[in-house]
Image: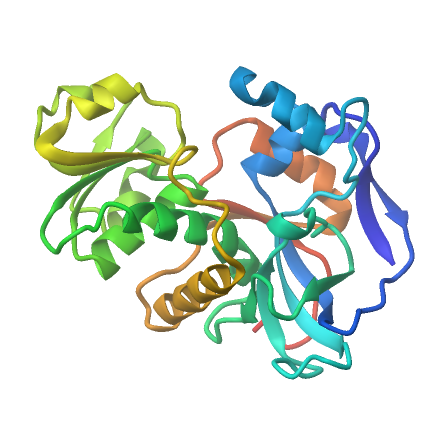
């Protein structure tokens, strides 16, 4: 089967398409024919090994000291169940699913992927394409878990810095349409209309105005890209306000049953029309290098999707 691998850290050109053996599902696993995956900022950082200094040692040990220990990137995917292990009862051959690969060592840049049937896997939302479904997973779960920690009440004032990114576009929609908050989004000029369309009551163009001069008016400030000054963000909070940072509050170590519950809840929001992934660009698997080049520029709106295997019914 086709797979995109990298054998050393570096620029997008270290990625290359190759053939590897097709996996066979274990008793508790499903084999997924991958229809779509994504290129996330996390994929870009792992490929280039551009991680924050404070995380350097941990990242080296986890990712590989001299070369990548996990040569296949891809944190999320969507596809169809092609085979099931003998102990699997939750899924059947032909089921459309979407999933996170974060806790199984990544590996979404492939034609076929085995995942635990009781892992971070769920039926694909019926109203999304495979590309949209793949893009819904990482940013959606991160935004949901982070915002939940603030116990947001209807009508509260919530500021989301980095509102046009993968996490931010989900956070705006979830905060406004699920929690009922009055959302202020911070983004660049070209993304103002998009962020407002996602549900923001107010948008601030950070290239034209200093959002940190708003004063202590927010119940929640969420830095969805971990690039703003924590001290300045906290100055915007009411006395009982809560500051959230995507790197510190995403709760990636949730129990397996909670991870699956989060994905199912995300599915319910999507099918209720309260949440829809934003796709900036979509590339075929053969153009994965170009997709990484684009993400490396740091200006993507929402998500960059990768079509791994196309189908004839329009991708639904």
Left or right: 267, with 112 as reference point: left
Q: How is the image coloured?
A: rainbow
In the drawing, does residue 137 fall left or right of residue 165?
right
Is residue 83 visible to the viewer in this orientation of the structure? yes
- Residue 293 appears in the figure: no
Q: Quadrant of the C terminus?
A: bottom right
Percent across and percent down for residue 96 are 61, 75
Q: Is residue 307 left or right of residue 211?
A: right
Vertical relation: 312 (above or below) 57: below
Residue in the image at 66% along x and 67% along y: 79
Quadrant holding the N terminus: bottom right
Q: Position of residue 233 (x, y in %)?
A: 23, 24
- The answer to whether 246 appears left or right of 309 in the picture is left
| Quadrant hosting residue 32 | bottom right
Q: Position of residue 48 (x, y in %)?
A: 68, 25
Which residue is located at x 43 percent, y 61 percent? 262
Q: 28 or 294: which is nearer to us?
A: 28
The residue that appears at 9% across and 24% down in the rendered structure is 215
Residue 27 in picture, x, y percent from top left: 77, 74
- The tally of labels here is 0
Can you say whether 77 is above or below 93 in the image? above
């Amino acid at each position: 089967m086709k797979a995109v691998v990298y054998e050393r850290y570096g620029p997008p050109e270290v990625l290359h398409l190759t053939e590897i053996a097709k996996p066979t599902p274990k008793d508790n696993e499903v084999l997924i024919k991958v229809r779509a995956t994504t290129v996330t900022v996390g994929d870009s950082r792992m490929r280039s090994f551009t991680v924050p200094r404070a995380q350097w040692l941990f990242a080296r040990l986890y990712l590989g000291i001299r070369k990548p220990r996990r040569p296949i990137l891809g944190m999320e995917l969507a596809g169809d169940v092609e085979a099931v292990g003998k102990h699997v009862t939750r899924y059947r051959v032909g089921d459309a699913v979407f999933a996170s690969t974060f806790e199984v060592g990544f590996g979404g840049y492939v034609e076929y992927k085995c995942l635990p049937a009781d892992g971070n896997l769920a039926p694909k939302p019926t109203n999304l394409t495979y590309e949209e479904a793949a893009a819904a997973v990482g940013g959606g779960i991160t935004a949901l878990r982070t915002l939940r920690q603030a116990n947001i009440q209807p009508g509260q004032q919530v500021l989301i810095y980095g509102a046009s990114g993968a996490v931010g576009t989900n956070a705006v929609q979830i905060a406004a349409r699920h929690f009922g908050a009055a959302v202020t989004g911070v983004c660049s000029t070209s993304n103002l209309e998009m962020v407002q369309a996602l549900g923001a009551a107010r948008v601030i163009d950070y290239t034209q105005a200093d959002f940190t001069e708003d004063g202590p008016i927010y119940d929640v400030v969420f830095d969805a890209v971990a690039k703003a000054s924590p001290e300045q963000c906290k100055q915007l909070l009411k006395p009982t306000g809560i500051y959230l940072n995507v790197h510190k509050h995403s709760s990636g170590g949730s129990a397996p049953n909670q991870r699956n519950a989060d994905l199912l809840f995300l599915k319910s929001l999507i099918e209720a029309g309260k949440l829809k992934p934003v796709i900036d660009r979509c590339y075929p698997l053969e153009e994965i290098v170009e997709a990484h080049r684009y993400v490396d520029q740091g200006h993507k709106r929402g998500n960059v999707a990768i079509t791994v295997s196309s189908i004839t019914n329009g991708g639904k």
